[in-house]
Image (cartoon, helix red, strand yellow):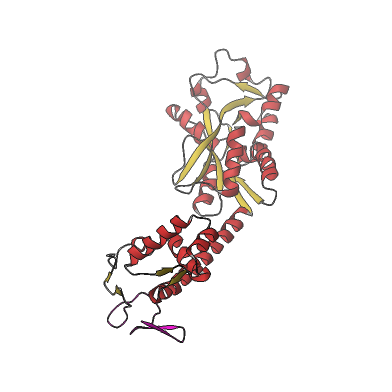
Amino acid sequence: MSRENGRVADGGSGDGWGEGPGRGVSGITGGMLAGGCPEGGSLARRVPDLGLLEVLLAVDRLGSLGRAARELGITQPAASGRVRSLERQLGVGLVARSPRGSRLTPTGLLVAGWARRVTEAAEAFDAGARALRGRRDSRLRVAASMTIGEYLLPGWLVALRAVRPDTAVSLRAGSTRMVVEGLLDGEADLGFVEGLGVPAGTDGAVIARDRLLVLVRPGHPWTALTGGLDPALLATTPLILREEGSGTREVLDAALAPYDGPERPLLELSSTTALKSAALSGVGPAVLSELVVGEEVAAGTLVPVPVRGVGLGRVLRAVWRRGERPSGAARDLLSLTRGNG
């Protein structure tokens, strides 16, 4: 084998791994590497690791195995071991050692040319991946059900701001159904829902627990009941409710299903704030999260009515697309919510 005008003259073009007659190089044949690695199958089994290629390129550049080891931050025996491993994998000699240092053999120079292209491609891949991570971490799209979005997330986002001041956060609040659709459509990075279980197509983590309350104005006949409200009466009474698809409605519907309820709503509102205002006006009984009426219950402007034998507890969850664990800013927000939940 000889080198002519910077190219390798060996019956082939020297522009890639040889395939077919007339394109092989000494010690490397089409169909089987001399080291015994068959062509075909996984590239990971046939192509050397980047760490091995980096040693070869460093030896070519520095002319010394010892200096190559120091540049790469490894010991000289480790560098020698990598060279031997690469030679065994390819089945050819790559480095000639002498008292004056180390130099690549003609075959080694050919392999180094290929290795350089591989490492350049790897550097471009790494740069692209870092750019994607930077773009991902520079924004966070959050979707949340109304209760969480209006009453819990603002505090969590303030805490996130202290951790990630350069991350732009957008928050979209709506029903649990809307949150899940946004996640599955790729329009949200992290969601927060309330309800009975983990929505289909998502994974989740419990961040808090909540309870629904049946609320009336002072003086309502239900405030005089002893022993709690009969669930059958609740099921047949028109109520002020959240819309279908919300976590609140899902829990109430499941609780009253044995009693053929709930009745057609007196009012159906998509905003927790609007629902609470309607309840305060005395239009009729309302069902709201315990989280959102603490001040009103303490002040006596709304009165909770216990319901006999019906569980109105629910779980608040962070959710994300199945199989895609939150990372970056989404992971940090998840940690903050669980710490405060």
Residue at 39 percent across and 70 percent down: it is 94
Q: Nearer the viewer, residue 13 or 228?
A: 13
Residue 236 visible (yes or no)? no
Q: Position of residue 87 (x, y in %)?
A: 36, 65
Q: Nearer the viewer, residue 258 or 81?
A: 81
Does 177 lie within the magenta span? Answer: no
Residue range highlighted in magenta: 1-24
In the rendered image, the vertical position of residue 39 relative to residue 316, given as above or below: below
Q: Nearer the viewer, residue 294 or 189?
A: 189
Relative horizontal placement of residue 292, taking residue 231 as reference (left or right): right
How many circles with numbers are drawn on the protein? 0
Q: Position of residue 88 (x, y in %)?
A: 33, 63
User: Residue 223 falls in which quadrant of the image?
Assistant: top right
Does 10 lie within the magenta span? Answer: yes
Q: Residue furthest front?
A: 99
Q: Main secondary structure of the magenta part?
A: loop
Q: Quadrant of the C terminus?
A: top right
Residue at 56 percent across and 46 percent down: it is 190
